[in-house]
Image (cartoon, grey):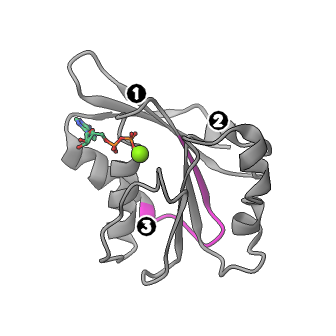
Amino acid sequence: METPKKIFLPDEESTKKLGKEFAQKLTPNSVLLLQGNLGAGKTTFIQGLGEGLGISEPIVSPTFTLINEYLEGKIPLYHIDLYRLNPEQVKHLHLQNYWEGIEVEAGITAIEWSDLLPQLPPHYWQIILELTPDSSRNAFITYI
Ligand SMILES: Nc1ncnc2c1ncn2[C@@H]1O[C@H](COP(=O)(O)OP(=O)(O)O)[C@@H](O)[C@H]1O
Ligand SMILES: [Mg+2]
């Protein structure tokens, strides 16, 4: 495991830009596990990612819908938010189908509140977003 890469994000635009640039290095079957408090910038990062994948449909928080699938970009994007669920409910979603490509087209799976996953994928990008005292953000990125 490499040491996390720390990136300072002074404003919303830089969080989006990080996501947009990140999209360029992702291949189908990539998994991004996003951690960080409410308002840390997880959805914002994924909005940038969507832009980088060429998705024109607005990326909205899946807090209520749980899973949003975007199929128009160069790689499908599966955006998941586990915030309102408990571990037992998460287990029943069979999210491993996304990264194993079972009955779905191989794509990028991005999961907010991934701490609730009962089972981790074999490899993933861990993206931790942290609020700084001056209301900017830090990102810590590790490939595991
Ligand atoms: N680097 C940043 N600096 C300041 N504000 C940011 C930054 N990144 C995102 N934001 C803002 O933080 C708010 C919450 O972001 P959001 O992505 O919805 O958080 P989360 O999905 O982690 O709950 C949004 O208003 C967004 O514009
Ligand atoms: Mg969110």
Q: Is residue 138 left or right of residue 92?
A: left
Tell me the quadrant of ligand 2.
Answer: top left
User: Which percent across, then down, holds residue 78?
Assistant: 55, 66
* Mark 2 burial class by Cα count in 10 Å: few <14, some 14-19, many 20+: some
> What's under tag 1, amino acid-wise?
Glu
Q: Residue at x 78, y 49 (%)?
A: 91
Question: In this rendering, which labeled residue sits more in front, label 2 or label 3?
Answer: 2
Secondary element at image label 1: strand
Query: Is residue 95 positioned above or below 89 on the image?
Result: below
Bounds of the magenta segment: 23-34
**Quadrant holding the C terminus:** top right
Q: Residue at x 72, y 48 (%)?
A: 90
Q: Which mark sits nearer the N-terminus, 2 or 1? A: 2
Q: Which mark is residue 24?
A: 3
Secondary element at image label 2: helix
Q: Which mark is residue 115?
A: 2
Q: Which mark sits nearer the N-terminus, 2 or 3? A: 3
